[in-house]
Amino acid sequence: MNNALKNIRARVNGYPSYLLREDIKSLFSQRKTTSLGLIWYFFGAKKLHSIINNRYYDKSMGCYNIEGVKLPEEMFNYKGTHFHIDLFDMLGKTCFDYYRKPNVDISRFGCEGPYELKNVKIEMGDIVIDAGANMGVFSALASKRCCTENNEGAVYAFEPVSQNVELLEITAALNSGITIIPEGLSDFTGEIEIFLQQGTGEHTMLSELSKNKDAEKINIQTTTLDDFAHKNNLHKIDFIKADIEGAERLMLKGAKNVLKDFAPKLAICTYHFPDDPQVLRELILDANPDYEIEDWHMKMFAYVPR
């Protein structure tokens, strides 16, 4: 481990823009705890910015290209240098499959961890629901995982906040098979107020989760997954990722038929309410008792054995 760090440091000191993929891959494969914090501390913000910008920025396309997952430069303009922390984290948990290794304990990580684990993985040809797409990082990754050259597979990116949709549209243009749905997923089809959390992006339909009681409120359109599947004549949904600021339980209530008939794999955030693990588990099993469910770090993963 020390030799690997010395090798990388020697390279970076001599060539700030040069970081070999295999060097980083080696770090991720050797460590049993996160390398993100270590590398961030080791190089510092400016050097990590330089390394990632030069290694993964594609000038011809005006985007970051990480193993075929394309993210617009506008994301960096929006989030600043912290965006590069997200990119580096993405290398470990998506491109190098580091967090999916069997000897890695995700509960040790300070981050939320991945949306794929064990039997809950996106496959080629899958129909994927990205509930809470934000700027489209997961949508871009899912597109790389599921979309084929024969136009099989698709990603439906649900994002009701217009400022996020503007960036999501750029992400969708860079990656194939992403359809943007500018609505929120809930347990009814209609209109509701959402509380905007400026600076965090954690916009919520639920007043009790609003960190700013004087937050700006806007009206958004909502739909249910059952209504969406019916109206769009979907014959399957294979994977649902949901991080929708406490509305995960509402989304599941509006997806009873989808869970029963399609039995999609589920990766759902469970950290917004203390009773999320219990409530979400009950909703899933009530809709389809065949689900196998595992609580993990800040998430719940569920699938029906095939």
Image: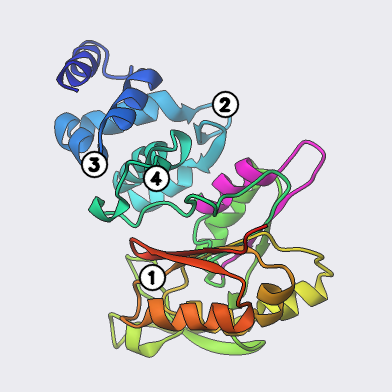
Q: Residues within 10 Å of mark 3 (few under 14, many from 20)?
A: some
Per the image, is 153 magenta? yes
The secondary structure type at the circle numbered 4 is: helix
Characterize the local packing of mark 4: few (<14), some (14-19) or many (20 or more) Cα atoms within 10 angstroms: some
Q: Secondary structure at mark 3?
A: loop
State the residue in front, 92 or 191: 92
Q: Quadrant of residue 98?
A: top left
User: Is 234 positioned to the left or the right of 186 in the image?
Assistant: right
Which residue is the site of mark 3? 33
- Residue type, label 2: Ser
Task: Report the Cα–Cα distance between label 1 and label 2.
Answer: 32 Å
Which is nearer the N-term, disc 2 or disc 3? Answer: 3
Q: What residue is shown with label 2?
A: 60
Question: Does residue 251 show up?
Answer: no
- Circle 1 residue: 202
Q: Nearer the viewer, mark 3 or mark 4?
A: 3
User: Residue 21 appears in which quarter of the rendering?
Assistant: top left
Name the foreground residue: 17 vs 99.
99
Amino acid type for the residue under numbered disc 1 = Glu
Q: Name which of mark 1 and mark 3 comes first in the sequence.
A: 3
In three-dimensional space, the C-alpha distance between marks 1 and 3, rounded to whole angstroms, equals 27 Å
Residue 173 pos. (x, y %) = 65, 46
Q: Which residues are magenta?
A: 138-159
